[in-house]
Structures are given as structure tokens and as C-alpha cells.
Amino acid sequence: MPSSISLHSVSVIAYGFRYRAPLKHTCLLYAHQLHSFHRQKPPTLPLFSSSFCRVLNPSFFTGNSLFSRMEQFWSGSAVNRNKGMTEQLRRYGVIKSQKVTEIMETVDRGLFVPEGTPAYVDSPMSIGYNATISAPHMHAMCLELLEDRLQPGMHALDVGSGTGYLTACFALMVGPQGRVVGVEHIPELVAWSIKNVEKSAAAPLLKEGSLSLHVGDGRKGWPEHAPYDAIHVGAAAADVPQDLIDQLKPGGRMVIPVGTFFQDLKVIDKKMDGSISVRSETSVRYVPLTSREAQMKGTD
């Protein structure tokens, strides 16, 4: 069952979505006291197969469902711009950091989604090739988890960089003296992400070389610019790849979904003596961290 949590003493219910491909959902869409801004009781909770929210009653997310009401809420006139979206995320306790607020206001999400899609709705969106761009609240969550390791001059690795949105955010956080690498095994997505970044606030960093996007197997990391203070992985590994642990700097942090059917978003910290500590942030459901060929199966 979904669990109630507290953000800045605000009661919320966590039972939403993040996914890297259609129908591959994971948890954490915030419904901030639905009865207060919808003037009604929260809806009856759907039947879940486990804590990571594999939905057994799809009709819950249609018509007058929670999901459609949340989509309408986030897509209203107050959030039809990137800044408005960010302000709402902060207002409802999803974003707590001023730095993350500034970065998400600066990097326009609309530049990183397919043309014609509602860029500022708090929902993941298909980007083709059996992949998605994550929902804004999940981008905010990952940025906050990694903020202390994204200080000016630090190095960051984004595995499964997709359309380049989070990679661009990382680059602005570490600045021109830092180094950010995005690795994506779909060549078409890498080419598209470069064009997206070129139109964004991170364009100077791409031109100067402190931000780069590469075609490659992210499971092997990118040794050329290791070790990394921050590593973000956007697909679920059955086990944490040893190459990524090896490329994590002492004092660094990795955020990675781990598991097969049952998955958790793991926060992995490497201590200064090289030892590793691991904690679970939330239950999730991601597509596997796998080969390009395996990911492309079943796509149009």
C-alpha cells in the first residue's frame, strides 16, 4: 500500500510514477493533501501488486482518477511555463533546495521533450526507442539527492542520459571548472540530446567541453573522466555494476535503481576509506539497465 510521508511538515501521499519506457512505472508522484485543493476526499486507493506500485486497476488512472486530476493540476495556467512548473514543485515540498530551484528554472524542460508534447506537466513522456524523459518531480528528487556532490568543480556521470535534460542540469551545477559526462547507448538519442543542449542554458559548457554526451554502454561508465563525485543511473541494474563503483570517487554518491521485478532506488555513498554504504530511498519500477539490442526489442 502507498505510504504517507512528510515533506517540510506537509503530509503527502506517495503512490505515483516514474518510468523509463511506456508502462514501466515507478513510485513518487506527490499528491499534496488532495482533499484541500480538490475540496473532496482522496480517491479510493487502487490495488497494487507490491510497494512499487504496479497497477492492477488501470481504470484508476483514467476519467476522474487521481492521475488525470493531478495532470490537470500541473498543466493549468499557473504552470504552463518552466518557471511556473518549478515554483509549484517547490510550493508543494518536492523541491526544497534553492540551488535546485534555480537550476530547474534555468534549464527549460520544453527544449528536451518531443515537439508538441505538454512539457511542463508533472508526468514522464515517451522520447522513442523504448525510453522516456522522467517526470519533473523525479528530476528534482535526483538533483536534491546529488546536490552536495554537484558543487562547482566536481565531476558527474549521467548513465542513460536520454534527451540530455538532467545532464544539462548537472553541468550548470558543477560549472565550467567541473566535468559532466552523459552516456546513452541509443545513437539517435545522443544526437538529439546534443541539439537540445545546444539550445539550452548549458550550451556554452558543451561548446567549451566541460559537458559531453557520448554513445556507449553506461554499465561500463566512462573511465576517461573518472573518478566521479556524482553518478546518476536511469535504468535498473540487477546488481550495481562494479565499474560504476570503481569510478565513484571517495566521498562521492551514486543514485541507481537496483533489482529485477522488485526494485529500490539506492543511494550509494563511497566513504573516504573506500568502503561503501547503501540505503534505499524509495521503491521504484524501471526498465532494465541492459544492452541497446535488448532495449530496442518491441519498439516501433
Image: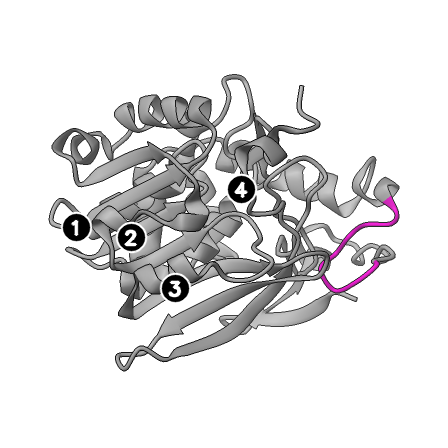
**Of marks 4 and 1, the one in the foreground:** 1
Tell whether label 4 touches label 2 (CB within 8 Å).
Answer: no
Answer with the quarter of the image where residue 196 lies: top left
Colour basis: one colour
Query: For the residues marked 4 and 3, what is the alpha-carbon distance in whole angstroms?
Result: 24 Å
Answer with the quarter of the image where residue 69 lies: top right
Give percent across and percent down for residue 60: 84, 45
Which residue bears the numbered disc 2? 156
Tell whether label 2 touches label 1 (CB within 8 Å).
Answer: yes
**Of marks 2 and 4, the one in the foreground:** 2
Q: Earlier in the sequence, mark 1 or mark 2?
A: 2
Which residue bears the numbered disc 4? 134
Q: Residues in magenta?
A: 49-57
What secondary structure is marked by label 3? helix
What secondary structure is marked by label 4? loop
Query: For the residues marked 3 and 2, what is the alpha-carbon distance in whole angstroms?
Result: 13 Å
